[in-house]
Image (tube, rainbow, N blue to C red):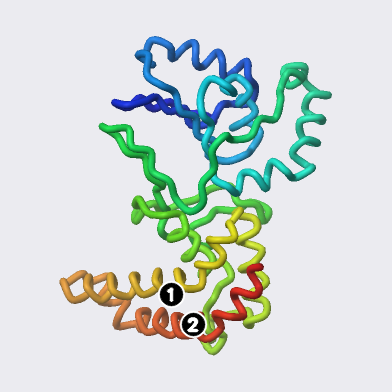
Amino acid sequence: MDAVFVRTERFNALIDTLGTPELCRTALDLLEEKAEARALIVVNSHMDWDHFWGNAAIAGRAPIIAHAAALDRLRDPTTQQVLTDKAGEESRFRDVDIIGPDITFSGSMVLNGGDLTREIVCHADFAPYNVATVDHEAVGIIDFDTAHPAPRLWDLAYAVYRWAPLSDPANPAVVFGLDEQLRRAEIFCSAYGATVEERRRLPKMICRRLQALVDFMLASAAAGDETFAEDVSAGDARLYLNDIGYVGMHRDRLWKALF
């Protein structure tokens, strides 16, 4: 799915603008009756070419909003090179101009449409065991049972914890030592497009995220949930508490690695 149209009480929101201005204009024409003369807001969810190359159809007629990390992607020389290559292959891309957002934000942003408020929905368990791969390339994400609205830093914190992973090497199940964990944490943040502010807050947020998980596990076990009771009995809560101490102990080195 490369674009979504949302009509709210106060405005219309177009999430992404497709791969060319022509495609975007066609989509807007088809949606004209549903628009009901409300103001239009455009959100670029990310900067893959098939999600924002239609921005030129919007420029000057509606604000385009994106996360600040989008600017880094736009400034990357490969962005223009991809357009040059595609324009040489297909004529439909020759009228594309790379147009960036008018408004950027860091962290999270809420658009209040009156009858509908759009928030980021976090996966809440984005970890290697929930990602399907083929030939070392991610092709799918599974297990959305715990998905819920939250700031994206909440999801980033748990993802970095799992993918680095930032667990005490004293645990026999942990493969990497601290130096490799820090290297992998920085790679993940760069690939994700983490902002300077998100990187600054990440070590503390990882600890908060793990503590929230422990609190939830203990409360659920106390309420009679057999699955969580078994997890607590197996020592999972103690493992997370130990990792909170581990991340806290190496917080300064983690900060340094992320910048």
Numbered tag placed on residue 207 in the rendering: 1
Q: In this view, does 31 lie above or below 82?
A: above
- Mark 1 crowd level (few <14, some 14–19, many ≥20, 10 Å Cα): many
Which of 234 and 25 lies nearest the eye of the viewer?
Answer: 25
Q: Name the residue under label 2.
A: 248
Secondary structure beneath label 1: helix
Residue 19 is situated, as x and y percent measured from the top left of the image, at: 63, 26
Say which residue appears at 36% left-offset and 39% top-offset.
118
Q: Decide if residue 83 is on the left or right side of residue 123.
A: right
Q: Where is residue 214 in the image (x, y as percent from the top left)?
A: 33, 75
Q: Where is residue 239 in the image (x, y as percent from the top left)?
A: 41, 82
Q: Say whether residue 11 is left or right of residue 79.
A: left
Q: Toward which corner of the image does residue 46 lie, by quadrant? A: top right
Crowd band around label 2 with a 10 angstrom C-alpha radius: few (<14), some (14–19), many (20+): some
Q: In this view, does 49 lie to the left or right of 128?
A: right
Q: How many marks?
A: 2
Task: State which quadrant residue 207 falls in.
Answer: bottom left
Check contact, mark 1 vs mark 2: CB within 8 A.
yes
The residue that appears at 77% across and 28% down in the rendered structure is: 86
Depth order, front residue of 24/56: 56
